[in-house]
Image (cartoon, helix red, strand yellow):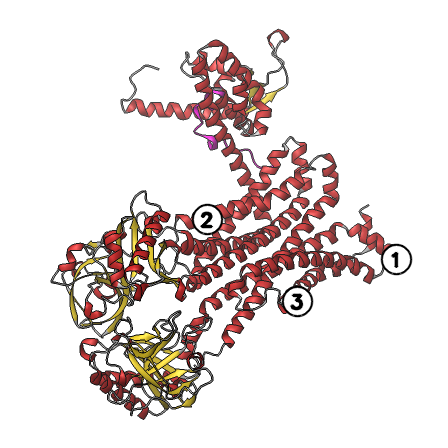
């Protein structure tokens, strides 16, 4: 029988109380009269099925009742739904984004088996360096931990023969790469091992490229694609979510290694390597094996690899520290908003519940049990939360594109997280949690006292000290959360301003920039390139409104690579760079750029010593370079660097000028010293051939774009012009993720500020109205208006001070955890804390004014008449 | 007060509900007696389980089809711990409507040649 009694607990308590005893008796008869196992089986089916139906019946009744009563108070209902929508929407958006970037499995089968492998040059400051082709081929031959180990490298290419020439991005992949990734083509086939020797140069294209350039035509297979004047045959189209190695890639072609391309050079660090672990091989085991292989290679090739090894990590973890922190910061902030929304709702619901106590007391008097009343109140809050969740998810879907800048392009994932079951699941969970969080406390609080005394109490509108305390704590929690948010926003604003104040080393105002990538088939030879540069630049200089113009390999902040070792001028055939190192113990690197004359004048970088590069620096004259001040300081301290020589990028150079330092690696990173060499003295290293055109204008820079396009088209008709933007846009791009994050955080802080003020207002209004009699008596006994005012304000001030103190401590902890994105701003910055505290106090004051005014206006005669 | 619902608004009835109404047609009964009566009326074909019975009773009370009665039968027949239920006027009206509905259905089925047994 105990079994049946336990089973009956599946029914709601009210049902059990009503019918439990009789059901037990009926079951006892059945138990006594027939087969025991059959009785047990019947009871199991009967009780579980019917218990569920009884719960559903109650839910249906409660829902009907909830909807009716919520419809009766539209003001309350709309406010509550909006508050819930803001909390749930904010949290859904940030959770979805963080899940997309940091947690969701990559869109490949068995994604956990995919690992990235690098050379480990920690001793030289590069713990993860792209391997060279010969190193990769050795790894591929020797490693046994991987099902496959493949290499790829992204590159840009000029597409011709399909309308205007265009610049598109794609990737070279070793023939097994696509098989390793495990995705099939949506149309045609993927690249395979046999393509390494194919004569028709197969290419697989992306879904986006297929749609934009081929109108999603199914007869695309077999068509020719002309990239950098080479012809490829399209053999496959990948599905839309195949974004490899990142979302910019439009095509994939087979990578060939050739010694002519520097592919036998172990210092040619140009490959990305990805492996798929064999079943049952752990990451640690693979790492141990690769380290062993790396150490062996270092011993075999000490000149190039001494002190280096190999390292690997799951592909999923390739999110840099900063985007990770920015995202986690947003998640934390949205949790604050949700918390504030929940406390606000709890407070709203509590006021409403207290106002409904007479109604509950009547229901209790006619037999409703306490658990039915709690259930009814929870249904109310879940109905509100569900409506909030519905609007919240719409809010999240609308807000997500604004957050897209926070999705780094280093992963094979889309820019926007998909709206899918995961997102809906997260919303559902948040909604349920929200509903329970803000519904349970008021429900328990109010229903605990639902008896005849509550009936009287309720009619009089009194409230207990305990309830007041709970509500005050909720308001304090709101103040704490909004102080944390405000401090974080204040600190991040300061960090943003500090980053924006960083001198990039050039003047970005009124500079027009664009890229004209020269196809090497036609411009492989220096004279052809120089002729192109001078035809374009001469005509641009003749344009009205142009002050000066120049070409460079890469604009600052657009390409952060191009780092070469600085060597001595002593020829050393045994050294990989062709010259002996400057120092046997450690290497020293510099950024190299090839430029045309007047580059410094154009970009606004001061020449502090010597001269600019000029047209007189030709391939036949001595090779020269202009270096940055930091280069001169490092290599020629306390000496005149002019006339001194060094070797870099396979040539020796004599310094003819020194210029200011430029932040090539971006505003927030230290750049290596810089070396500028004349485009006219660049016989090799075609990758560095100047392609970025920069023009300083005396008229609004963008107005020059059409004329410049015409000049480039006249000089070389099939040349695509890409990346037309002002230098200010390039620099603004540096802080774009910060700005995006701050906008969201700022909105969160504003909302939480508003919600907290509403919370304080709600609490005090309620306190004043429930204490109207007491206030009336005080006034009748001679209390002055300012005494009453002080009484109300003192209460809100106490809450504010407690909230600010706890909030400041929590904010300091939060600020410490995000120190690395604070760009040197002190996490205990006084201004940030003072302004947040000031705002919190102001908010409390604003929230208490109306209730205080109402308290002062209490009419003692009306207020005391009720007694 | 909301106006009394029309009997048709509750149709069609759940079979269990209709059986309970029929079992209460001639006298007030407690839960177990209802089970027994239904069993007897259907020659053992329909056996209401306790869960179904009391869940139905709860809904029927809510829908005013039955009421709980406090007049007890003769002491020798009474089980004091039992609750007795009585069909209401509204309950009778609903049962009649359901019976009419079902017989209309049977008439239609007969016209289609689906009825093979004599009623």
Q: Is mark 3 on a helix, strand or loop?
A: helix
Q: What span is colored magenta in the figure? A: B1-21
Residue A426 is marked as: 2
State if disc 1 and disc 2 touch (CB < 8 Å): no
Q: Which residue lies furthest to the left in this view?
A: A199
Q: Which of A441 and A483 is in front in this view?
A: A483
**Residues under labels 2 and 3: Cα distance?**
36 Å
Q: Mark 2 — on which chain does it sit?
A: A
Q: How far apart are marks 1 and 3 (CA)?
A: 39 Å
Vertical order, B91 against A729 (above or below)? above
- Give residue A131's quadrant in the image: bottom left
Circle number at residue A782: 1
Q: Quadrant of residue A97?
A: bottom left
Q: Residue at x 63, y 55 (%)?
A: A478
Quarter of the image for the C terminus of chain A: give it.
top right
Of residues A295 and A148, the one nearer the viewer is: A295
Disc 2 versus disc 1: distance between alpha carbons?
57 Å
Q: Residue placed at 51% from the left, 47% from the top? A: A431
Element marked by disc 1: loop
Q: Circle 3 is placed at which residue position? A: A834
Q: Viewer-proximal residue, A781 or A347?
A: A347
Q: Nearer the viewer, mark 2 or mark 1?
A: 2
> In this figure, what is the number of numbered marks?
3
The first of marks 2 and 1 along the sequence is: 2
Residue density around tag 3, few if under 14, some if 14–19, many if 20 or more, within 10 Å: some
Residue A617 included in the magenta stretch of the image: no
Q: In this view, does A18 lie above or below A859?
A: above
- Residue A481 seen by the camera: yes
């Amino acid at each position: 029988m105990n079994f049946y009694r336990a089973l009956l607990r599946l029914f709601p308590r009210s049902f059990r109380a009503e019918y439990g005893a009789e059901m037990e008796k009926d079951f006892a008869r059945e138990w006594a009269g027939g087969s025991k196992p059959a009785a047990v089986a019947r009871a199991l089916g009967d009780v579980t099925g019917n218990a569920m139906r009884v719960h559903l019946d109650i839910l249906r009744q409660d829902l009907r009742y909830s909807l009716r009563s919520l419809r009766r108070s539209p003001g309350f209902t709309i406010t509550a739904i909006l508050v819930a929508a803001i909390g749930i929407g904010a949290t859904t958006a940030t959770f979805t984004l963080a899940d997309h970037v940091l947690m969701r499995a990559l869109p490949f089968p068995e994604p956990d088996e995919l690992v990235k492998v690098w050379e480990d040059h920690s001793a030289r400051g590069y713990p993860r360096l792209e391997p060279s082709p010969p190193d990769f081929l050795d790894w591929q031959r020797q490693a046994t931990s991987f099902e496959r180990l493949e290499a790829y490298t992204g590159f840009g290419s000029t597409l011709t023969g399909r309308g205007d020439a265009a610049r598109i991005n794609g990737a070279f992949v070793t023939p097994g790469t696509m098989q390793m990734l495990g995705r099939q083509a949506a149309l045609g086939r993927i690249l395979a091992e046999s393509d390494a020797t194919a004569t028709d140069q197969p290419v697989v294209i992306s879904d986006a490229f297929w749609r934009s350039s081929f109108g999603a035509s199914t007869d695309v297979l077999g068509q020719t694609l002309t990239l950098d004047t080479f012809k490829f045959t399209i053999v496959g189209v990948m599905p839309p979510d195949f974004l490899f190695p990142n979302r910019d890639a439009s095509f994939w072609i087979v990578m060939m290694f050739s010694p002519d391309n520097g592919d036998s050079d172990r210092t040619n660090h140009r490959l990305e390597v990805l492996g798929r672990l064999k079943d049952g091989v752990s990451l640690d085991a693979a790492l141990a094996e690769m380290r062993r292989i790396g150490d062996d290679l270092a011993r075999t090739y000490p000149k190039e690899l001494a002190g280096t090894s190999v390292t690997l990590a799951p592909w999923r973890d390739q999110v840099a520290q900063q985007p990770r922190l920015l995202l986690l910061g947003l998640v934390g902030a949205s949790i604050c908003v949700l918390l504030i929304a929940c406390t606000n709702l709890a407070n709203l619901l509590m006021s409403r519940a207290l106002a409904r106590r007479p109604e509950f007391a009547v229901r209790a008097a006619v037999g409703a049990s306490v658990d039915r009343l709690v259930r009814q109140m929870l249904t109310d809050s879940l109905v509100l939360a569900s409506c909030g969740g519905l609007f919240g998810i719409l809010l999240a879907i609308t807000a997500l594109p604004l957050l897209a800048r926070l999705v780094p392009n280093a992963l094979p994932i889309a820019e926007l997280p998909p709206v899918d079951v995961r997102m809906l699941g997260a919303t559902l969970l948040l909604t349920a949690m929200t509903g329970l969080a803000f519904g349970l406390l008021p429900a328990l609080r109010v229903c605990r006292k639902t008896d005849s005394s509550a009936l009287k109490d309720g009619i009089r509108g009194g409230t207990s000290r305990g309830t007041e305390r709970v509500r005050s704590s909720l308001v304090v929690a709101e103040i704490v959360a909004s102080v944390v948010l405000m401090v974080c926003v204040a600190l991040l604003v300061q960090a943003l301003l500090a980053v924006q104040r960083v001198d990039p080393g050039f003047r970005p105002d009124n500079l027009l920039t664009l890229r004209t990538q020269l196809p090497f088939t036609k411009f492989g030879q220096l004279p052809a390139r120089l002729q192109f540069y001078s035809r374009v630049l001469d005509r641009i200089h003749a344009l009205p409104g142009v002050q000066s113009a120049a070409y460079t390999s890469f604009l600052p902040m657009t390409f952060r690579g191009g780092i070469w070792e600085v060597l001595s001028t002593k020829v050393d055939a045994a050294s990989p760079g062709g010259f002996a190192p400057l120092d046997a113990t450690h290497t020293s690197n510099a950024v190299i750029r090839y430029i045309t004359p007047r580059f410094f004048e154009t970009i606004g970088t001061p020449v502090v010593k010597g001269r600019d590069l000029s047209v007189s620096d030709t391939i036949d004259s001595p090779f020269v370079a202009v270096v940055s001040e930091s280069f001169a300081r490092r290599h020629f301290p306390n000496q005149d660097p002019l006339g001194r020589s060094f070797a870099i990028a396979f040539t020796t150079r004599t310094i003819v000028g020194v210029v200011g330092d430029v932040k090539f690696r971006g505003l927030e990173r230290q750049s290596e010293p810089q070396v500028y060499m004349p485009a006219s003295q660049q016989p090799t290293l075609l990758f560095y051939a100047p392609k970025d055109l920069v023009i300083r204008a005396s008229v609004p820079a963008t107005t020059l774009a059409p004329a410049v396009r015409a000049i480039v088209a006249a000089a070389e008709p099939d040349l695509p012009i890409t990346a037309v933007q002002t230098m200010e846009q390039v620099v603004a791009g540096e802080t774009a993720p910060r700005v995006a994050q701050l906008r969201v955080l700022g909105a969160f802080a504003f909302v939480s500020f508003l919600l907290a003020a509403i919370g304080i207002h709600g609490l005090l209004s309620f306190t004043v109205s429930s204490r109207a009699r007491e206030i009336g008596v005080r006034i009748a006994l001679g209390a002055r208006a300012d005494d009453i005012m002080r009484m109300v304000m003192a209460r809100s001030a106490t809450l504010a001070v407690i909230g600010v103190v706890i909030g400041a401590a929590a904010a300091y902890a939060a600020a410490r955890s995000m120190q690395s994105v604070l760009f040197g701003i002190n996490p205990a910055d006084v201004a940030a804390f003072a302004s947040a505290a000031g705002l919190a106090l102001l908010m409390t004051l604003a929230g208490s004014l109306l209730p205080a005014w109402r308290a002062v206006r209490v009419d003692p005669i009306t207020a005391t008449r009720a007694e | 007060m909301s106006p009394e619902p029309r009997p048709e608004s509750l149709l069609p009835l759940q079979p269990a509900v209709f059986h309970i109404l029929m079992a209460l047609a001639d006298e007030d009964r407690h839960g177990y007696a209802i089970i027994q009566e239904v069993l007897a009326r259907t020659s053992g074909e329909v056996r209401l389980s306790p869960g179904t019975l009391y869940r139905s009773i709860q809904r029927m009370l809510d829908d005013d089809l039955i009421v709980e009665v406090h007049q007890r039968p003769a002491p020798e027949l009474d089980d004091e711990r039992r609750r007795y239920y009585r069909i209401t006027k509204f309950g009778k009206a609903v049962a009649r409507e359901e019976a009419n509905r079902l017989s209309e259905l049977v008439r239609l089925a007969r016209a289609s040649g689906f009825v093979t047994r004599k009623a």
